Image (cartoon, helix red, strand yellow):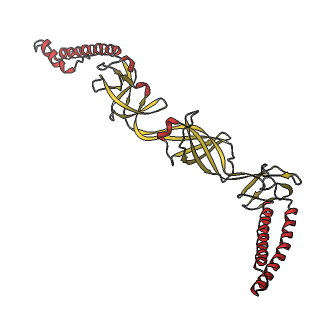
Amino acid sequence: MKIRVSLFLLPALLLFSCKPAKEDKGTILDQIFEYKQKIKELEKQLSQINEAEDKKLPKVKILIAAKESVQHTFSVTGMIEAEEFAYVSPEMNGKIKTISVKEGAYVKKGQLLATLHSEIIQNSINELKTGMELAKIMSEKQKKLQEKKVGKEIDYLQAKNKYESLQAKLQTARAQLRLSKVQAPFSGIVDAIHGKVGEMASPARPLFECVNLNTMKITAQIPENYLPHIHEGDSVTMDFPTYPGLRKKTTIRRIGNIIHLGNRTFKIGLQIRNKDKKIKPNMISNLLICDYKGNDFVVPSIALKKDKNRTYLFVVNSENKVEKKYVETGIAIGSKSVITKGLEPGNKVVVEGQNLINAGTKVQILH
């Protein structure tokens, strides 16, 4: 306990020790000065005693509880793909007759990329046209004879059937002729050509690689424990090891519905615009995903203590004595924890020295 001496004791001391009035005024002033010096000496001694007592008290550091803006993020690796990418092959077997583009060329959807030799198909078309013209004439003549009741109905039906059959064959041949042309499936860049004029081409072998870099899609595998905390539309910040300093912001477009058995993860999908064409397919990106945002009390996790199944903090009251305060915790953010219940603004939370004290201990607060 600290001891204090006040100068208010001075009159009492003077009254007790003063001699009769015959002493002169100078002597009284000397005595007053002497008493003041003694009081100063006593106060100094008492101060030293109090300091010695304080040194014996456990020393702690505190945090004044106040709510603050809190955000928790985690990082995962994302794989980048083009929204539109295709291996383009001819739809029929044949020898390459022409290649109309070069690698790196920009093409529009439907633009001709290559043709295959189609002379046999063209000859078949010419023959079918000739046969169809003859069949049409025969069909018309048989129809007139039938109308005049001269010809047989069966002859007319056979001529008509032959004409219609040749029409169908001609349509098929023309469709085959169209298959000899290889066209761009979408607007984009011809990134690679895997054939030369004169070589054989087939549906099983890609002849071109086409890509549209305007829009890229990103996929990432997220640990299962984050599933309750992320949602479609959540903000994501992306950076790229290939381009230090480049950052892009996007949102989660899709959350997968299946947990992968091998690594207990689920898939998310994102999309970004790529006007400058810097982002390429198969590049690696780092995704910084926010899974918690709020305004909460935050304390160092090391300050938390356990009492059976309950969590508590030590707080210092107005008399510098320690009290136990039970709390409920939320998400951990690095070395700190969010307190969701139990703390009040202004509480003096012990954050250092908590292992040296118990409830009721008087402490010295270090500043």
Q: Is residue 343 above or below residue 179?
A: above
- The quadrant in which residue 91 appears is bottom right
Vertical order, 214 against 34 (above or below): below
- 279 or 138: nearer the viewer: 138
Q: Residue at left 37%, top 23%? A: 306
Q: Quick check: 249 left or right of 339?
A: right
Instruction: Give whichever of 152, 137 is nearer the camera.
Output: 152
Q: Looking at the image, which residue is at 86% across and 55% down?
A: 96
Residue 356 shown left or right of residue 262 in the figure: left
* Residue 312 point in image, percent of width and height: 35, 26
The image quadrant of residue 131 is bottom right
- Quick one: which residue is furthest to the right in this view? 198
Task: Residue at 33% x, 28% y: name it.
Answer: 326
Q: Nearer the viewer, residue 27 or 236?
A: 236
One can see residue 367 in this view: no
Marker count (numbered): 0
* Residue 172 placement (x, y as % from top left): 77, 65
Question: Horizontal and vertical percent for residue 206?
Answer: 78, 50
- Where is residue 200? Give x, y as percent: 86, 52
Vertical relation: 102 (above or below) 349: below
Q: Quadrant of the N terminus?
A: top left
Q: Is residue 71 left or right of residue 209?
A: left
Q: Nearer the viewer, residue 351 or 249?
A: 249
Q: Residue placed at 49% from the left, 42% from the top?
A: 230
